[in-house]
Amino acid sequence: MSVTRQYRDAWEGFWREAPEAPHAVFWDAEPALTAGRHLALFEPHLTDPGLPMVDLGCGNGTQTRYLADRFARVVGADLSAAALDRARRADPAGQAVYRQLDLTDKGEVQTLHAELGDVNVYLRGVLHQTAPDDRQLVADALAALLGARGRAFLVEPAEAAASVLAGLAEDAGGPPAKLEPVLRHGIAPGTLVDDAVPEHVRAAGLEVLRQGELPLITTEYRPDGTRIELPSLWLVVGPVG
């Protein structure tokens, strides 16, 4: 079985079983705490806000719908058909369009770019979940979608997040309820060194316009009632020149 097929099957199983209630998934935090904070950093760098906005790895579409309230044309793209089914059900008015997309498939990426033209991209937590050998393919796909005019906002858990997650997974009482199904389906967060994201971006022919650190908010809480947050790195990138 190919890596992509294993990855797709893991996500299909996860999304088929996940509760449909809002914020029931570990990373499905309120947009005001996620995409809202990210847009404040991203929007000043958009050279053409009128381009379609593509939410890559959109999952159940929580952040996609937030983006659709702020941009004229928004596309949520994901590898998992089950995730996209949820996204469409949660968006009965059709604020956004949802597309199945394998970012490691050059043909699929080229087809989407041919349909939409250059786009702006929001990409949250995708690279660290991608097999190491496929990460450059994802960065190359990002560059292809941006074209000459697009900009992208990427956010990924920092290296330091690994120890936080390991501590949660190894807790004597077991992992938190919302983290357990992630681990059980074999889609545990991958280790991504802090320098890897900008390196992949530059290797794809993109430049880093701005970068920084932010806590990545989850929907889970510790026994003392504090919300679990993961250190993360964010970048705004675009074509060179």
Image: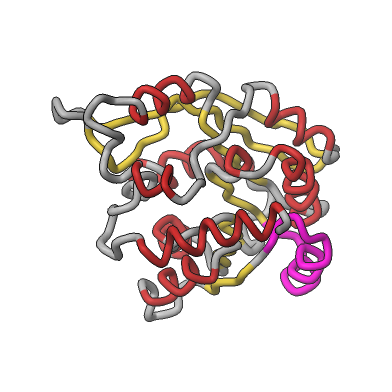
Is 191 positioned to the left or the right of 161 in the image? right
Please state the horizontal and vertical placement of residue 128, each as a whole percent of the image: 59, 37
Q: Is residue 55 above or below residue 212?
A: below
Please state the horizontal and vertical placement of residue 141, each as a whole percent of the image: 77, 52
Q: Is residue 103 magenta?
A: yes
> Which corner quadrant of the image does residue 119 belong to?
bottom right
- Magenta part mainly helix, strand or loop? helix
Q: Is residue 78 at all visible to an observer of this figure?
A: no
Q: Give whichever of 99, 3 is nearer the camera.
A: 3
Looking at the rendering, the stretch of residues picked out in magenta corresponds to 102-119
Please state the horizontal and vertical placement of residue 49, each as a whole percent of the image: 61, 55
Seen at 67% across and 42% down, the residue is 131
> Which corner quadrant of the image does residue 65 belong to?
bottom left
Question: Quadrant where the C terminus lies?
Answer: top right
Q: Is residue 213 above or below residue 92?
A: above
Q: Is residue 16 magenta?
A: no
Question: Quadrant where the N terminus lies?
Answer: bottom right
Please state the horizontal and vertical placement of residue 34, each as a whole percent of the image: 40, 43
Q: Give whichever of 134, 64 is nearer the camera.
A: 134
Is 222 positioned to the left or the right of 190 in the image? left
| Residue projecting furthest to the left | 224
Q: Give whichever of 94, 52 is nearer the camera.
A: 94
Is 207 positioned to the left or the right of 23 in the image? right
Seen at 44% across and 75% down, the residue is 88
Seen at 29% across and 53% down, the residue is 23
Q: Is residue 75 above or below residue 176?
A: below
